[in-house]
Amino acid sequence: MLDAVEQTVKQDVESADQFTVALDRLTKKTVKVLRLLCESGNPTTVLASSITQRDLARKLHVTRQALSVHITRLTDAGLIQAGRGFINVTENGLKATGYHHNPAILIVRVAPQNQLEAYEKIKKIRAFETFRVAGDADFALVVDQRNLDKVLQDLYAIQGVIATKSLIATETIRQTLQYENTPAI
């Protein structure tokens, strides 16, 4: 079990290193383009779907061509973004399906002797984001408020979960793409 955690950490470090190398290869003008895009953009929520169009067509019992008609309609309506190898559900698409933009944030404490087992099980809980954290807690999850009861049930079914704290977002006051104290690229 420890090997799996070490492997995950190693992959995260390699991914961060690759990101750093990619950033180093950007020219100042390219970074300026990115910055201007960020400054002129509006923060939105996009859910990147991991299902392939082939698998989606199979689940719906339709051909890929028939699915393509639906994908085009959803794209034209601004509910999804689709391209070669990706489908993203836009904020409007999430709203159309009843997604609630203000999430619940769960703070989770786990007994030290159960950390590895809990890590593997918490990774599988349906959440927008899941973090391993340091400080007064071991994990933080950002979940849809509508799924809060189910997520809490799933958490308390994990051996070693000793405490949770639920924070309910009532309003998004500000959303930024860069932390204010982070040095500019």
Image (cartoon, rainbow, N blue to C red):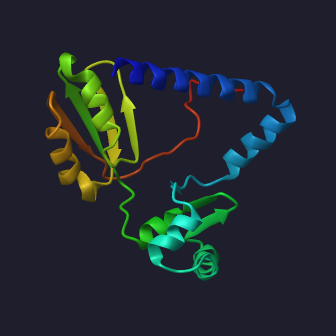
Residue found 35% across the figure and 44% down from its top: 142
The answer to whether residue 111 is left or right of residue 143 is left
Q: Is residue 27 above or below residue 173?
A: above
The answer to whether residue 171 is left or right of residue 168 is right
Pick the residue in front: 164 or 156: 156
Q: Which quadrant of the view contains residue 181?
A: top right
Is residue 183 visible in the rendered structure shown here?
no
Question: Where residue 115 sits: x, y (%)?
Answer: 25, 22
Q: Which quadrant of the view contains residue 145?
A: bottom left
Q: Is residue 77 above or below residue 56?
A: below
Q: Is residue 79 above or below residue 151?
A: below
Quadrant location, the C terminus: top right
Question: Where residue 35 sits: x, y (%)?
Answer: 73, 40
The answer to whether residue 26 is left or right of residue 81 is right
Question: Where residue 86 sits: x, y (%)?
Answer: 62, 58
Question: Where residue 105 sits: x, y (%)?
Answer: 30, 42
Is residue 176 visible in the rendered structure shown here?
yes
Residue found 56% across the figure and 61% down from its top: 52
The answer to whether residue 143 is left or right of residue 25 is left
Q: Which quadrant of the view contains residue 101?
A: bottom left
Pick the residue in front: 171 or 54: 54
Residue found 43% across the figure and 73% down from its top: 96
Q: How many tags in the picture?
A: 0
Residue found 47% across the figure and 79% down from its top: 61
Quadrant location, the N terminus: top left
